[in-house]
Image (cartoon, rainbow, N blue to C red):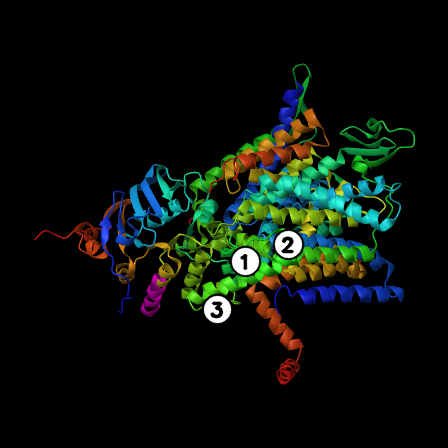
Amino acid sequence: MTFLSYLISGLSLGSVYAIIALGYTMVYGIAKMLNFAHGDVIMVGAYVCFFAMTRWGINPVFGILLAMAVCTVLGVIIERLAYKPLRAVPSLFVLITAIGMSYFLQNAAQLLWTPNPKVFTSVVGNASIKLFDGQLSISVIAIVTIAACFVIMAVLSWYINNTKMGKAMRACSEDKGAAQLMGISVNLTISVTFAIGSALAAVAGVLLCSAYPTLMPTTGAMPGIKAFTAAVFGGIGSIPGAMIGGIMLGIIEIFGKGYISTQLSDAVVFAVLIIVLLVKPTGILGKQINEKV
Amino acid sequence: MATPERPDVKLVPVPSTNIIPERDVDKEPILEARNLGIDFGGLVAVDKFDMAIGRTEIAGLIGPNGAGKTTVFNLFTKVYQPTRGSILLDGRDIQNMTTVQVNRAGIARTFQNIRLFGNLSVEDNVKLGLHNQINYGMWTGILRLPGYWKSEKLMHERAMELLSIFDMQRYASHRAGSLPYGAQRRLEIVRALATNPSLLLLDEPAAGMNPSETAELMKNIVKVRDTFKIAILLIEHDMNLVMGICEGICVLNFGKIIAKGTPSQIQNNPEVIEAYLGKKKEG
Amino acid sequence: MKKNNIFLIYGTVIAAYIIIQLLMSAGAVTSSLRGQLVPICAYIVMAVSLNLTVGVLGELSLGHAGFMSIGAFTGVVACMSLESALPPTLPRFVISLLVGAAFAGVAGFLIGIPVLRLNGDYLAIVTLAFGEIIKNIINCLYVGIDSRGLHLSFLTNSDALNLEEGGTVIINGPMGIAGITKLSTFTFGFALVLVALFIVLNLIRSRAGRAIMALRDNRIAAESIGINVTKYKLMAFVTSSALAGAAGTLFALNYSTITAAKFNFNTSILVLVFVVLGGLGNIWGSIIATTVLVILPELLREFNDYRMLVYAIVLILVMLATNNATFKNTLRELVNKIIPEKLIKRKEGTTDGNS
C-alpha cells in the first residue's frame, strides 16, 4: 500500500515537473536557450492565483485563468525585452541574461509580496479519496494534477502537429533562417512559444502550491531546476521527452524520499539523471546530432 | 596557365590494388585500402574501395559532388569506422586506432570547410601541429622550468621554418581566424605538415583560390612532396591542378571507383567523361 | 592591448594589495568592506579557475560551487584536526589549503572522466547535478575527532560517531561546521590569488594550454593533429576544480560557521556571472568583474531593499549593452552627447604627439 501511495504522489509531483518541463523544452527547441527565469514565472503565477482567491475572493478556476493571463503577458514581455535583442549571440550570454531576469523576478516578488511565506489554499480543497478501507488515501489535488498533465500533453501534441502555428514552431526549431524565407514570422512564433510556456508555468505553479502549500519568492527556483533536469532527462527539445522525463523524475524523487532518505532524495534524482545521460548522451528521446566533418 | 615542372614518371601496375609511380614500386605502399566500405544506416556511402599510394606519390581523388571523396578521407583518419575492409598504413592495420593515433602513426589532413583554431595566433596553430613532436609536461610549463624555454624556442624556430614554405612568417602573430581565405587554407597545410606525417591528405586545397593562387599552390604541393619526401593524396575539383601535379588519379562516383590511372588515361576514359558530363546521346 | 597581458594583471593586483593595505593602516577602509576582502580573494580564485573551464576549455560548468564546497569542508577538517599537532598558523593554513585543493582535484578527476564525454548543455546540466549531489552528501556527513583519530558517519547523527570523552564533532550534518578558528587574512587571500594567477596564466601560455584552447576552437581539428581530447579536457577540469577547492578552504577559514547550503547552485551561477561579464578566456576581466560585482551590492546599500533588484537590472543591462549592436550604438551616442567631442579629440591628439 505504501508503494501505491508513493507511486501516486510521485506521479502527481512528476506531472507538475512535466508541465514546467514542457515550457522549458518548447523554449529550448525554438530559441535554443535555457530560460532560467521560467521557474520564477511559476512563482508569479502562484502568487497571482493566491491573491485572486484570498484578497479578491475570486473563484479558483478564474484565479487560474487570471494567473495564466498574467504569466502569458509576462513571458512575452520578458522575451521581447531581454532575450530578443540577444538572438544572434552565443547562448551562454542569453543564459546569463536569463539568470539576471530570474534574480529580477525573485527580488521584485520580495518587494511586492514580502519574503514571508504565504500559506496557499488548494484550488480544489483538501479532500481525499479513501480506498482499501482507508489504507490508501489519494488526495483530489493529486488526481487533478495528473489529469491536467495528460490533458495538457494531449492538447499540446495536437496543437504542435496539426495547426499552422504548430507547424511554424517545428519549422523554426529546425532552421529559423529557412522558416523566415518561407514567410513564417519567426518573432511571432517565438512569442507564441513563450506565451504557451508561461501559461503552462502558471498552471504548474498553482498545482504545485496546492500540493505543497508554502508560497515564497523563491518557491519556483528548485522546481524550475528540477524541471530543467527533467527536460534534459527526456531529451531537451522533445515534447514527449519532457513529459516522460518529468514524470520519471517525480517518481524517482518520491521513491528516493520514501525508501532511501529524505535528505538524499535530490542526490538520487541527480544521480539517475547522470546515469541516463552517460548511457544516452542526449536524453531518453533526444536526437543524436553528429557534427559533419 | 603554366604547369609546374615535375619529374616525368611512368606508372607501372603493381600486384596490389592500384598503380604506383615507378620509383615507389620496389617499396611497400605508404597506404593501402582493401575492399573498404562504409554504410550510413543502410545507405552505402563508399563500397569496394581499393587503393594504394606510393611513398612519394602525389595522388588525386576526384569525382562529382557527393561521390564520397571526403568520406574516404574520414575513413583514412578514422573519423568514421569502416563497415568493411581494411586500411594498412605503412603495412600496419589501423582498424583499432583512433583519429589521434592515426595522426601519430603518420596521416595528417586538411578539411574541406577550414578548421583552424581561429582564436589562436598563426604561430600557435603551427605549434599545435608540433604538439607531439616537441614534448614537455604540464608542470614544466606552469613552473617555467628550463625544459619549457628550450622546447618553446625549438617550437618557435620549427614553426617559422614551416611557415616559410608558404612564405607566411609575417603572419605569425596574426589571429588565424582573421587571415584571408587562401592564407587560411595554406595555414591548414602547414599545421598538418607540422605533425610530421608520411601521408598528407588535402581536401580541396584550391577551393576558393584564384588562378594565380592555384598555380602557386601547385608549385608548393610539389615542393612539399620533394622536401619532405612524403605522399600526398588530394581531393580537388580544379582539373588543371589535378591533371597538372597528380601522378595517379582515382575517380569516385556514387561511392565506387570507376577509374584509376595516369592523368592522360583518366582524361580519355569514357566512363569518367560520362560521370562528369552525363551520357552522350547516340548519333 | 592583448587580452591577457600578464604584467598588467600582476602589476595591478599587487598595486591594489598595497593600496588597500595602506588604506587599512590609515583606517580608511570601512569594516563592511574589510569583511569583504577575503571573500573577494576567494571569489577571484573561483572566477579565474572557472574561466579555465568555461573560457579556455569552452565547456559550460554550472556546478563549480560543488568543488568549492569540497575544498571548504576538507580544508577545515584538516585545519581543525591539525590544531594541536601544528599550532603555528601559516603552515597549518597552507596544509589545509593543499588538502582542500587535493580533495577537490580528485573529485574533479572522478567527475570529469564520465562528464567530459558529453557536450554543451548536457555537460552543463550534469555539472549542475554533481554540484547538487555534493551539497546533499555533505549535508548528510558527520565527522568527529578524538584521541583515536577521525571518525566518519553518514546519514545518521553525531552520536553515531562514537566519540570518546573530550572528542569534538567537526562536521555536524546539515548544521555544517561551527567554531572555526578564522585563519584567513587578506594577505593569505592575496597570496592565493597570485598563486592561482601564476598557475592559470602560465598554463594557458604553454604547450598544454594551447592544446586546451585548441579543443575549444575546434575539437575535430585538434584530434586530426594528434591532440588527446580526454587528457587535456581533464587537465583543465582538474586544475580548475583544485583551485576552486583551495578557494573554498580560504573562504571557509574566514568564517566561524559554514554549511553546505552556502555552496549551492546560486553560488555556481554567481561565479559564472563574474566569468561571463569579465569576458570568456579573459583572466584580467574575471578579476575586475569579481571585484566590482562583490562590492556592488555593498555600494548599493543606500538602495537598501532595492539593491538586489538594481543588481539584477544592472546585470541584464550589461549583457544587452555588451552584446546587442543597436543597444551599443545608442549607448555610444549617449556617451558622445554627455562628453563633448573636443575632449575625446584632444585625448587622441596627445597620444599621437607622444608616439
Q: CA distance from mark 3 to mark 2?
A: 28 Å
Q: Amino acid at mark 1?
A: Val
Q: Amino acid at mark 2?
A: Thr
| SS assignment for the magenta stretch, majority | helix
- From where the camera sits, is residue C306 visible? no
Q: CA distance from mark 1 to mark 3?
A: 34 Å
**Residue bearing the label numbered 3:** B169
Identify the chain of the residue marked 3, using the numbered disc in the image. Answer: B
Question: Which residue is found at the position 50% from the left and 59% from the top?
Answer: B125
Q: CA distance from mark 1 to mark 2?
A: 38 Å
| Residue neighbourhood size for the residue with mark 2, other residues' Cα within 10 Å, grouped as few (<14), some (14–19), many (≥20) | some
What percent of the width, then of the height, locates residue C129?
64, 40
Identify the chain of the residue marked 2, using the numbered disc in the image. Answer: B
Say above or below: A11 vs A230: above
**Residue bearing the label numbered 2:** B140
Question: Which residue is found at the position 68% from the left and 32% from the top?
Answer: A265
Q: Which mark is residue A89?
A: 1
Identify the chain of the residue marked 1, using the numbered disc in the image. Answer: A
Say above or below: C216 vs A21: below
Q: Answer with mark 3 or mark 2, whichever residue precedes in sequence.
A: 2
Q: Which element is circle 2 on? A: helix
Q: Which residues are magenta?
A: B208-222
What percent of the width, then of the height, locates residue A22?
55, 40
**Residue at the top extreme?**
A133
Q: Amino acid at mark 3?
A: Gln
Horizontally, residue C38 falls left or right of residue C277, namely right
